[in-house]
Image: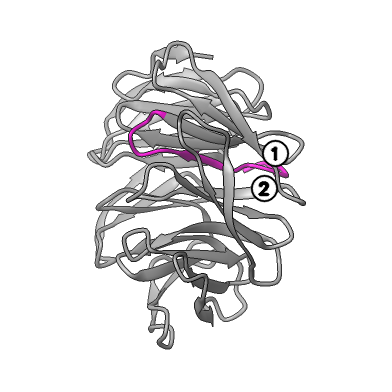
């Protein structure tokens, strides 16, 4: 994956709003309720550039952001009013790798690239836990599983943590260096440098291994239906089913996709621009660019 300075992207689960990084570190908001003609719906700005974002799964108007200095914020984004920052915390030291929600959207976490993670209760504002999840190994991504945070390291290990307790045991997923991760409601997908994908269920049991392409993978996403969408440094974007069937392939041109997000039947793909390309998950046809 190319080293884009800001590559945050978050698709609201109803596919009606999209948040995407701009080159200057702001977060551009798009109204995608009419996918053929997305409309700018505002922008978010923090003291430092925004590097991660996540919509609250239980409150459609709430968005979490993490800035490059570690600051974490919660925004209220009603469709008919200006954005409002309703809470802000100093997160773990180091550039954040990801942010997200646990405990059905009641708590917010942020994880630095070093694995240091903090969780806050959004209603009270209290920090309800801090932990070192990776043992110093670089973290590729973190995600929520119920009231637990799951960290995936670049060396192929997973670790779960329930705030208020000690982190769980290490889980070995792969012996290959991990390039990217993606989650759906039922799957974890990890990608190696060589284009090999490994899929796991909610208990981290192997589901299937796939070799999707010999090219260097750029970004990865997974739909709740199990369709995998991947981009490559050459500019191609493909969709593959879990049985290995290539469903479609398209090209983004000379500029590779830095980020991919899936919601409903839509795929959002972004390069350096803050304007997304929207594709149909079913067949990859362009809806808006």
136 above or below 109?
Answer: below
Q: Quadrant of residue 87?
A: bottom right
Q: Is residue 250 magenta?
A: no
Q: Residue at x 38, y 63 (%)?
A: 106
Residue placed under numbered mark 1 in the picture: 26
Specify the farthest residue to the bottom. Answer: 166
77 sits to left or right of 267: right
In the rendered image, residue 75, in percent from the top left (x then y), is placed at 54, 48
In the rendered image, residue 158, in percent from the top left (x then y), is placed at 42, 70
Residue placed under numbered mark 2 in the picture: 50
Q: Looking at the rendered structure, which numbered label has been put on residue 150?
A: none
Q: Residue at x 31, y 60 (%)?
A: 104
In the rendered image, residue 124, in percent from the top left (x then y), is placed at 47, 71
Q: Quadrant of residue 6?
A: top right
Type of secondary structure dominating the magenta stretch: loop
Q: Is residue 13 magenta?
A: yes
Please tell me how crowded label 1 is: few (under 14), some (14-19), or many (20+) other residues with Cα within 10 Å.
Answer: many
Asked if residue 212 shows in the view, the reply is yes
In the rendered image, residue 151, in percent from the top left (x then y), is placed at 46, 68
The quarter of the rendered structure image containing the N terminus is: top right
- Tell me whether the residue at label 2 lies in contact with that at label 1, contact meaning CB atoms closer than 8 angstroms: yes
92 above or below 76?
Answer: below
Please tell me how crowded label 2 is: few (under 14), some (14-19), or many (20+) other residues with Cα within 10 Å.
Answer: many
Q: Secondary structure at mark 2?
A: strand
Q: Earlier in the sequence, mark 2 or mark 1?
A: 1
115 sits to left or right of 159: right
Residue bounds of the magenta highlight: 1-16
């Amino acid at each position: 994956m190319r080293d884009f300075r800001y590559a945050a992207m978050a698709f609201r689960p109803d596919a009606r709003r999209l948040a995407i990084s701009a080159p200057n570190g702001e977060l551009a908001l798009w109204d995608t309720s009419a996918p053929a003609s997305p409309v700018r719906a505002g922008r978010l700005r923090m003291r430092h550039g925004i590097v991660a974002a996540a919509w609250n799964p239980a409150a459609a108007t709430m968005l979490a952001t993490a800035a490059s200095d570690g600051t974490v914020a919660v925004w209220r984004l009603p469709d008919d009013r200006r954005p409002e920052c309703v809470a802000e915390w100093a997160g773990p030291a180091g550039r954040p790798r990801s942010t997200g929600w646990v405990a059905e959207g009641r708590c917010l976490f942020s994880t630095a690239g070093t694995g240091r993670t903090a969780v806050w209760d959004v209603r009270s504002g209290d920090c309800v836990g801090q932990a070192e999840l990776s043992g110093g190994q670089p973290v590729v991504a973190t995600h929520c599983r119920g009231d637990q945070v799951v960290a995936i390291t670049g060396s192929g290990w997973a670790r779960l943590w329930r705030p208020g307790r000690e982190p769980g045991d290490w889980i070995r997923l792969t012996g290959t260096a991990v390039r990217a991760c993606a989650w759906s409601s039922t799957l974890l997908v990890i990608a190696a440098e060589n284009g090999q994908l490994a899929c796991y269920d909610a208990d981290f049991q192997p589901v299937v291994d796939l070799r999707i392409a010999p090219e260097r993978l750029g970004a990865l996403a997974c739909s709740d239906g199990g369709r995998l969408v991947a981009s490559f440094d050459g500019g191609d974007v493909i969709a593959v089913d879990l049985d290995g069937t290539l469903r479609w392939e398209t090209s983004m041109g000379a500029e590779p996709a830095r980020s991919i997000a899936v919601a409903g039947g839509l795929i959002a793909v972004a390069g350096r621009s803050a304007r997304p390309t929207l594709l149909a998950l079913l067949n990859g046809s362009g809806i808006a660019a």
